[in-house]
């Protein structure tokens, strides 16, 4: 891999993924600044050089700047990487906007769909900053922070409508253990990595009920069909859902012990309520909010998404999980390929 000029990169979000990406970027020799929302957490991370709550055991190099001051985090930087939960991305981008010159590249490393507007994260960033879409990229894929921080081989996608922007992000983030492909189908990449979290909750429910491999294989296959139907209606390319942002990320999230979304579903499958499960979690399970968005998008685009609909009723309408599964299995017969 050819050596590229070093970059000045801001990472907005001091959670597990933000920490992992910061350490990865530092390993490439980039100048890295991390913005953490809560001042007390920023202080603790600076003093201990560890994110003990979110990513314990991983050392944060001394020359990574950690701050809760937005101006310090973004001023004079070239790359702005947003790694906050989806429900906080709009506010975070708004805080950063006054300090941007307009020639930076914005990288979205957050998976989700805004509940109120039903917009993808790159659309939210454009709304707030006024940046054109060719200055925005999305960096996503099957990439658990716990594994990336330990140098476990990982592959993701840099997606932008502008191929040069996608390639620039590829150059900045790629390492011997973190391989980055490019894609120009931003709609497909963003919708894929967001919607798969809904399927992961369903996969967890199946695990909690003690179902087996047959069920998981069927769920992933039909879940991918739902994701693809909706994504294509939103303007995505069908083949994107066979790639890292679709099938790859979905399989990883549905089977992984690291997956927060699968964990939420598993605990509900065991009989616990959503409120109980979320009250004990430190990190965000994006699929809970995305379930609302998925159902809203399905209605907007008139796409049938039976799995997402049942997950919605389980999470927000207290529907018994066995009743939801029975309804899925007893739906009217259909051919396998029909969209």
Image: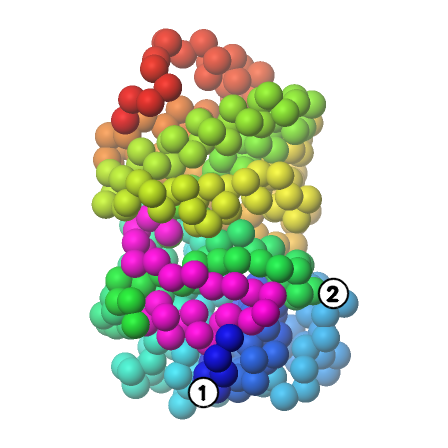
Say whether residue 335 is left or right of residue 216: left
Image quadrant assignment for residue 308: top left
> In the rendered view, would you say 149 is above or below 185?
below
Q: Nearer the viewer, residue 316 or 240?
A: 240
x and y percent of residue 37 in the render?
54, 71
Q: Earlier in the sequence, mark 1 or mark 2?
A: 1
Label 2 belongs to which residue? Answer: 56
Q: Which element is circle 2 on?
A: strand
Q: For residue 161: magenta?
A: no
Quadrant, the C terminus: top left
Residue 124 appears in view = no
In percent of width and height, residue 158 lies at 40, 63
The region drawn magenta spans 165-189
**Disc number for residue 200:** none
112 vs 187, left or right, is right
User: What label sits on residue 5 in the rendered view?
Assistant: 1
Residue name at image x 55 percent, y 27 percent: 217
For residue 163, which quarter of the picture?
bottom left
Check the image and report above or below for 5 versus 141.
Answer: below
Per the image, label 1 sits on a secondary structure element best described as loop
Q: Characterize the local packing of mark 1: few (<14), some (14-19) or many (20 or more) Cα atoms within 10 angstroms.
A: few
Rounded to the nearest angstrom, the CA distance separating label 1 from label 2 is 31 Å
Q: Is residue 171 magenta?
A: yes
Q: Tell me if mark 2 has few (under 14), some (14-19) or many (20+) residues whose alpha carbon lies within 10 angstroms of its own.
A: few
Q: Image height check: is 12 above or below 257?
A: below
């Amino acid at each position: 891999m050819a050596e590229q000029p070093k970059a000045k990169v801001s990472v907005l979000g001091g959670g597990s993924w933000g920490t992992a990406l910061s350490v990865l970027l530092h390993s490439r020799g980039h100048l890295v600044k991390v913005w953490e929302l809560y001042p007390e957490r920023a202080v603790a991370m600076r003093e201990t050089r560890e994110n003990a709550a979110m990513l314990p055991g991983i050392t944060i190099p001394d020359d990574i700047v950690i701050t809760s001051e937005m101006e310090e985090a973004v001023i004079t930087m070239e790359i702005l990487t947003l790694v906050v939960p989806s429900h906080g991305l709009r506010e975070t981008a708004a805080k950063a906007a006054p300090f941007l010159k307009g020639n930076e590249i914005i990288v979205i490393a957050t998976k989700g769909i805004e509940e109120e507007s039903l917009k993808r994260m790159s659309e939210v960033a454009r709304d707030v900053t006024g940046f054109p879409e060719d200055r925005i990229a999305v960096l996503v894929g099957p990439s658990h922070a716990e594994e990336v921080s330990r140098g476990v081989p990982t592959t993701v996608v840099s997606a932008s409508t502008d191929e040069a922007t996608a390639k620039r992000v590829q150059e900045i983030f790629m390492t011997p253990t973190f391989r980055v492909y490019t894609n120009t189908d931003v709609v497909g990449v963003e919708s894929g990595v967001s919607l798969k979290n809904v399927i992961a909750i369903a996969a967890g429910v199946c695990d909690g009920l003690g179902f087996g491999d047959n069920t998981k294989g069927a769920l992933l296959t039909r879940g991918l069909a739902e994701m693809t139907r909706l994504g294509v209606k939103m303007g995505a390319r069908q083949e994107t859902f066979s790639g890292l942002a679709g099938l790859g990320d979905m399989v990883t999230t549905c089977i992984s012990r690291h997956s927060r979304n699968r964990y939420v579903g598993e605990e509900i499958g065991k009989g616990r309520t959503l409120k109980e499960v979320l009250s004990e979690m430190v990190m965000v399970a994006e699929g809970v909010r995305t379930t609302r968005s998925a159902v809203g998008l399905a209605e907007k685009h008139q796409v049938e998404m039976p799995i997402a609909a049942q997950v919605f009723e389980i999470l927000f309408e207290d529907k018994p999980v066995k009743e939801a599964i029975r309804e899925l299995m007893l739906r009217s017969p259909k051919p396998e390929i029909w969209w």
